Image: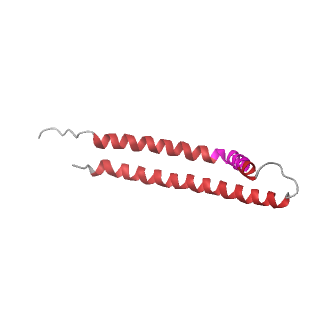
Amino acid sequence: MIDIRASKPLAKAIGARRETQRHLECLTRQIMARASRQATTVNVQSRTRRRSGPRTYYRELIERITFECWVELDMITCRHAMQEQVISELQHCDDAPMHHPAT
């Protein structure tokens, strides 16, 4: 039998985790897009002198932008880890047999 009181916090925690995951994915896409735009701009401006290969430079840009956003990334990652822990504990509680006193 499913305990509705126990499954409601679990559903809420799963929804919060899903939202945090979306935020993390959005931030990752923004970093990749920003690095791509900057790499394109630099490649166009410096056609005559090549620093390094375009892929190497793109990776350097991603690392630099990720470093600039590390506080937000760290906060979201920590929140996601905490939500995973809460969900696993709630699932464990749902799996435990319910003992009701005999009436």
User: Which quadrant, please, contains the C terminus?
Assistant: top left
Outermost residue, left direction? 103
Please tell me which residue is depicted at 41% across the width and 51% down the height of the picture.
Answer: 14
Residue at coordinates 61% horizontally, 47% vertically from top-left?
73
Please determine whether, in this image, residue 17 is positioned above or below residue 93. below
Residue drawn at the location 37% of the way across and 40% of the way down: 89
Q: How many marks?
A: 0
User: Going by the image, does 35 lie left or right of 47?
Assistant: left
Q: Does the magenta stretch include residue 44?
A: no
**Could you say which is closer to the camera, residue 52 or residue 40?**
52
Place of residue 12 in the rendered image (x, y in percent of width and height, measured from the top left): 40, 52
Q: 41 above or below 80?
A: below
Give coordinates of residue 63: x percent, y percent: 70, 46
Q: What main secondary structure does the magenta stretch of the protein show?
A: helix
Which is more toward the observer, 8 or 101?
Answer: 8
In magenta, the rendered stretch is 59-71
Res 34 → quadrant: bottom right
Q: Is 17 left or right of 67, judged from the image as shown?
A: left
The residue nearer to you, when weighing 71 against 21, is: 21
